[in-house]
């Protein structure tokens, strides 16, 4: 059966659209840069003291950014810098000791730096973030459990698109040469680290 000219034209246009769509392919990823909001960046740690209980502390100054695609969940890069002398455990003498050469040696090594090397997405917003942690001038690999809590426009204030993230890991401080009190059981070797982050999209 011979098709009328209008029908032929319509079919040709449809074929053209299909071919064009095939050439374009799926939507391209759109990685975006996110800056960690310093006003909503909590860096906490805990370490066992004499086997009795954990001492809990904070680092009060930290900054960082990362490049992330929310659609594909691909992380291109990430870097976080923590000021070593901003450590706080709610005890002045202890804070001074933690800053000195037995622990953080903050004068010689003022920055603690994490740089990401990879990200493996999991289910329900979870994932594993791999990277390198530089502490006391030594760099060793670490892996963090990460969870995306919320993504969306901030409801007030800056109104920017924001990611809410929780991350945690446990390290052995002796791996970085911080072994004060480990042999005598005074201060635990394992340090639990927890990060609560609000990151703003550029």
Image (tube, rainbow, N blue to C red):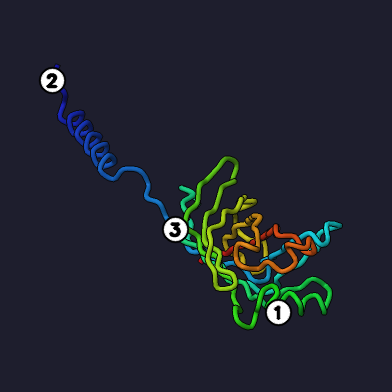
Relative depth, front residue between 120 and 169:
169
Residue 14 sits above or below residue 188 on the image: above
Picture quarter containing residue 18?
top left
Which is more N-terminal, label 1 or label 3? 3
Please identify the residue farthest to the bottom as the structure is shown. 107
Tell me, yes or no, whether the two marked residues, 3 and 2, touch with CB atoms within 8 Å.
no
User: What residue lies at 57% left-to-right and 40% top-to-bottom?
Assistant: 123
Q: Image quadrant for the N terminus?
A: top left
Q: Which residue lies under the disc numbered 2?
A: 2
Disc 3 versus disc 1: distance between alpha carbons? 35 Å
Question: Going by the image, does 103 lie left or right of 72?
Answer: right
Relative depth, front residue between 118 and 74:
118
| SS assignment at label 2 | loop
Percent position of residue 105, x then y: 65, 78
User: What residue lies at 17% left-to-right and 29% top-to-bottom?
Assistant: 8
| SS assignment at label 3 | strand
Please identify the residue farthest to the left as the structure is shown. 2
> How many numbered discs sit on the rendered protein?
3
Q: Which residue lies under the disc numbered 3?
A: 76
Q: Which circle, 3 or 2, is nearer the viewer?
A: 3
Q: Which residue lies under the disc numbered 1?
A: 100
């Amino acid at each position: 059966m011979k098709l009328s000219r209008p029908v032929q034209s319509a079919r040709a246009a449809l074929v053209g659209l299909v071919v064009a769509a095939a050439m374009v392919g799926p939507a391209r990823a759109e990685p975006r840069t996110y800056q960690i909001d310093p006003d909503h960046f909590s860096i906490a740690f805990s370490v066992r003291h004499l086997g009795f209980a954990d001492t809990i502390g904070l680092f009060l100054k930290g900054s960082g950014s990362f490049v992330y695609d929310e659609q594909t969940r691909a992380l291109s890069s990430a870097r976080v810098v923590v000021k070593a002398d901003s450590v706080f455990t709610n005890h002045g003498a202890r804070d001074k000791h933690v800053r000195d050469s037995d622990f953080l040696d903050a004068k010689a090594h003022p920055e603690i730096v994490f740089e990401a090397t990879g990200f493996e997405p999991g289910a329900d917003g979870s994932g594993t973030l791999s990277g390198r942690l530089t502490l006391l001038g030594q760099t060793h690999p670490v892996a963090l459990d990460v969870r995306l809590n919320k993504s969306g426009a901030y409801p007030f204030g800056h109104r920017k698109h924001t990611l809410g993230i929780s991350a945690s890991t446990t390290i052995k401080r002796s791996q970085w040469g911080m072994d004060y009190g480990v042999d005598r059981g005074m201060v635990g070797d394992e340090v639990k680290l927890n990060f609560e982050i609000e990151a703003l999209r550029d």
